[in-house]
Image (spheres, rainbow, N blue to C red):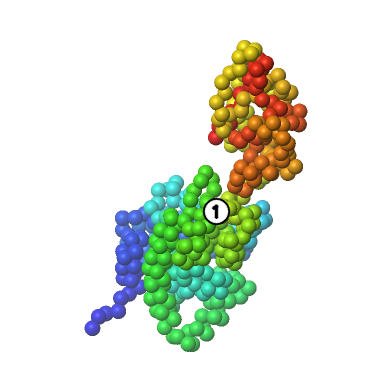
Amino acid sequence: MNKKKTLVQKFIKFSAAKRLANAKKKTLLTVSGGMDSVVMCALFNKAEFPFAIAHCNFQLRGKESDGDEQLVKELGKKYDVEVFVKKFKTEKYAEEKSISIQLAARELRYTWFETLRKEKEFDIIATAHHLNDNIETILFNLTKGTGIRGLRGIPFRQGNIVRPLLFASREEIENYQQQNKLEFREDSSNADDKYTRNKIRHNIIPLLKEINPSLENTFADKIELFTELETMYEKQMKKSATQLFLLRGNDIYIPILKLKKTKNASSVLYEYLKDYRFNSEQVDDILAAVDAEAGKQFLSSSARVIKDRQFFILTKLADKDSSIYYIEEGDKEVKLGGRLLKSEIIPIAIGKKSEIKAEKNSAYIDKAKMEYPLVARKWREGDYFYPFGMKMKKKKLKKFFTDEKIPLNEKENIWIIESNKKIVWVVGYRTDERFKVIDTTKEIQKLQIKD
């Protein structure tokens, strides 16, 4: 008959199987003083894995917070390991960032942990999340709405952060604490049901355990399965994304014809667009617009999808550039946002018009017709000019862009150069007939735009 494994043995086996902590890795343990992290310290000590302790005092519970800090320092003495403590002005940080206290504490602690890891040359950072934390996370994700990724809960490894207790149930941890008489601190906020996780812990899980007393074991098995399914799913999604999403400059082009032929188009599109904060309803709206007229737009908080003739175009949102730049007569270079405008004067003999090669990113202009300073700005609704080669026919820029079939996302980034409120050059596209070089031109001003 096989002897039942102890928690220490399970801990060592899980860490080896998942390639987490071991005797050769220097680990920074994140220890709050609560039962879970206190047990984690004991397990690392029993397994003879090298470690040090990091503790955050968020100064949110007065003397309770100071008591937590003191207990953690005592743990350092007990195990003869180094203890790092940092006090945070959490409420002030949350107010300055306009975020919740919980999110503020999370940002502060993980930023500090990583800084500490690098400075003290730790290999990994270990947190004390356990199996029941994972179950609560999955139920929370299901309640809020999740894809397959949310069903596998908390990953046992995330970059430099590992979670070597994910195999252990809360009951196993409590039993180990009691058997070894480990002193710990109880966070009073854990009893407050105003937090969603506490509602799940105190109310939902006990009801589920009435239906299935082996709830933890059932979830442990399914988490492994969902993790494997997620790996397979993401592999297929990446393959589909490579075929469907085309990178052009800073934008992503999605060919509408290919999208129509893509199997599981909704899933493929959602998995790609969710990183740009589009939700599933917006993805459905985008798919419903495949046969709509060009110009329809879909916005998230960080990006925009524009329906063009043959493509959906995904563009990251940026602050609208309302900058105006002035170009003096002697200027040789001017920065226009992230681009560089170069200027040079080319003298020519009267009656001997130079051969000018048409170049998309260059403009050749009769300098005598210019009035300085020139103005460089983004185009605006209502702008018009007289396109070169059209025999002084006036045309609105909006109509010009449509005729040139310029994608909607590119239109917004087009600059113009003007002289005395007259457009000289639609940068990168066309000069104005009024400023063209003629046989009597003495000097040419060449303008060239470079990325």
Extreme residue in the top direction: 349
Q: Residue at x 62, y 48 (%)?
A: 408
Can residue 96 be seen in the rendering of this structure? Answer: yes
Extreme residue in the left direction: 1
The residue nearer to you, when weighing 277 against 206, is 277
Extreme residue in the front direction: 391
Residue 53 placement: quadrant: bottom left
- Above or below — where is 145 with respect to 361? below
Q: Residue 106, percent across and down?
A: 55, 59
The residue nearer to you, when weighing 424 against 344, is 424
Disc 1 marks a residue whose amino acid type is: Phe
Q: Residue 447, percent across and down?
A: 61, 26
Q: Residue at x 46, y 60 (%)?
A: 30
**Quadrant location of the C terminus in the rendered image:** top right
- Above or below — where is 324 with respect to 276? above
**Mark 1: few, some, or many residues within 10 Å (few <14, many ≥20)?**
many
The residue nearer to you, when weighing 239 against 136, is 239
Can residue 33 be seen in the rendering of this structure? Answer: no
Q: Residue 415, percent across and down?
A: 65, 37
**Quadrant location of the N terminus in the rendered image:** bottom left
Q: Secondary structure at mark 1?
A: strand
Number of callouts? 1
The residue nearer to you, when weighing 135 against 71, is 135
Q: Residue at x 61, y 42 (%)?
A: 404
Q: Residue at x 35, y 60 (%)?
A: 21
Q: Residue 83, percent across and down?
A: 45, 55
Classify residue 79 as left or right of residue 251: left
Residue 450 placement: quadrant: top right
Label 1 belongs to which residue? 311
